Amino acid sequence: MISGKRKTVGVFLCKAYSLFDNAVYQALEQEAKKHDFDVIVFTTVGYFSSQNEYDAQEQGMFAFAPIEQLDGIIAAPDTYEIEGFREQLHNELIRRAKCPVVAIRHLGEKYDCVYVDQGLAFRPLLQHLLDYHGLKRISFLAGYKGHPDSELRLKAFREEMTARGLTVDEEKQVTYGNMWLNCGQKAYEDLFSDPEDTPQAIVCANDYMAVGMMMTLREKGIRVPEDVIVTGYDNVPSIALNEPTLTTVEQDFTEMTRIAMEELDRQIRKRETAETETGNRKIPLGGRLIFGESCGCGCRGDDYYVKISAQRGRQVDIMNTREVGMTYLTIEMNACDDLKDLHRVLVDKMNDTPSVRDYYLCLFEKGKDDRGEPVFAEEMTDTACLVHVMRDRQDHGMPMITFDRSQLLPEMAERTDEAQVFFLMLLHQRENAYGYSMFHYQPGEVPSNFFQHWNIVLSGALSNMHKRNELMLLYEERRLSSITDVMTRLLNRRGLEEQLMPVWQQLCARRENAAFVSFDMDWLKQINDNYGHQAGDYAIRLTGNAIRRAAPKDAILARVGGDEFLAVLPRANRQDADRFMDSFQRELELLNRQEDRAFNVESSCGAVVFKLNSLSTIEECIQKSDEEMYREKDKRHACRKN
């Protein structure tokens, strides 16, 4: 999609730092190279109980993604836990996708699916408890109601129990949690309410709830597995060292992704040869039963603690380093006034992101300013600008390339020698969207929640920059209004001094010329008396317009009184001043003819050219130019009387 020279597969999933997401990402790297596909992972964050404004903005990813232009799509609908996300993803794919779509970890009717058959995966665990351990009283700790995987595992539990002639008491044997560690207390209260009828085993819908359950049981003095067996699902790496290792079920997400990419490749090639096929393919996968201490059938091994301690030590070091890095990143990004500052910080912090090989920062653009510079938006637009590039861990500067946002990156980001897997995250704050980040990780590296935090900090910095710019614009508007004459839009007396002072100091220091030209309108009182004050205001505006049209570019123009104007021409000589005054009279005459009013607007003007020095003052120059103007006015009036 970046250049159209290589097929592009889009992948839709949520969180992107879980066991599942990391397995998917690693498989995508291998399969992208194998099939020569560029892959864009459109990732969002958020989970069932988060429910905040940031999560709500993440839903914009579905509208943002150029679904129509993708050559193939892999979607993991079950990873979206926030209400409405799955439905919107489904609707966008149905409405906009023109390419093959393969769903993973999800069994649906609309797409081809590569999924774990929960019955096929879960039943060996249940059979192990029922047959090998000979248990009868088994309870189930499900996730929140509506969680797709949990519901299917619960269904398999009910079916297997029923097949053995065992009745499931829904009130006593089934309880619901939240797929996380903190649901143990409630589950204990539900499942152990009758001391005479306690479970022999608790089958949990995932490992996190299983560990949370074991923590609570230990606090209550109940031993695992001696008093009750606890099992999990997913085979998440060891969570709590002081709890038994889990008997659980492992899903092969790598194989799932590999098969999905194979299926996409097959369908893309079929389309290219105009072959068609009917019906959606459903490709089920099983699971692998992992024995742990929580049922008494597994053991840690002599080197378990050594391995875990080393692993945890590395994780703590990484987390501490990232925490410090994130703190300083937040401080420095919040101090950025503009994109150049932001670019400098991103370059300085390159060492904090060793897992990233390439990084592209793109901002939504809504047009160009008078100088041809991009104007950045606070909402999604059809145009983006590439404002920062790190490639092969080298700073590639600020290209400031404007491109069609549906291409995701300009052509310069293409690599002809290899397929790329990009990880894309939106940049937003509350109701505003600023752009997106695209990461390409080093070989073998996987995404982590560090980059979610990175993106949030970057979004905050962009938000601050927009607010700062808005305040600066507001300040500039108010400043201009305080130095501008409302009627003529020329400078007022305060504005004249503000604009002139920096130039004045240079002129005096270099002993250069400056022409002061004073204007005073003729017969303004008669216009007011005969035609009203609106006509008088019109006459003032006309005079100001004639001055503006006649003035050279570097002239400083002001209305300094009711009908008095002043022009300062830096570095002008006498000839320049006379040329300006002649031009002014011609412009005034032309405007009078164009307007064709019952009266003509006239004005007297006089100029004095000064050779400035350190003793020169603005007040003195204005006074002398006024005197010259009044002499010219007297001459004009004398000529009229004669």
Image (tube, rainbow, N blue to C red):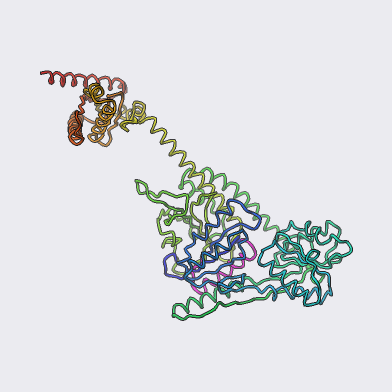
Percent position of residue 241, x then y: 77, 60
The percent position of residue 174, horizontal first and vertical second, equals: 77, 65
Question: Is residue 593 or residue 2 the one in the foreground?
Answer: 593
Q: Quadrant of the C terminus?
A: top left
Q: Is residue 433 left or right of residue 571?
A: right
Query: Quadrant location of the N terminus?
Result: bottom left
- Name the image quarter holding residue 30: bottom right
**Residue 505 visible in the current orientation:** no
What residue span does the magenta drawing correspond to? Answer: 17-40
Name the quadrant containing residue 49: bottom right
Q: Please identify the quarter of the rendering in which residue 575 is found.
A: top left
Residue at figure coordinates x 84%, y 72% from the top left:
136
Q: Is residue 637 above or below residue 268?
A: above
**Front residue (pair 439, 629):** 629
Q: Is residue 388 magenta?
A: no
In the rendered view, does 100 fall on the left or right side of 323? Answer: left
Where 334 falls versus 198 (above or below)? Answer: above
Instruction: Name the outermost residue toward the right.
Output: 196
Q: Residue 251 or 22: which is nearer the viewer?
A: 251
Q: Determine if residue 478 is in view.
A: yes
Q: Nearer the viewer, residue 14 or 113?
A: 113
Secondary structure that dominates the magenta span: helix
**Left or right side of 219 for 623:** left
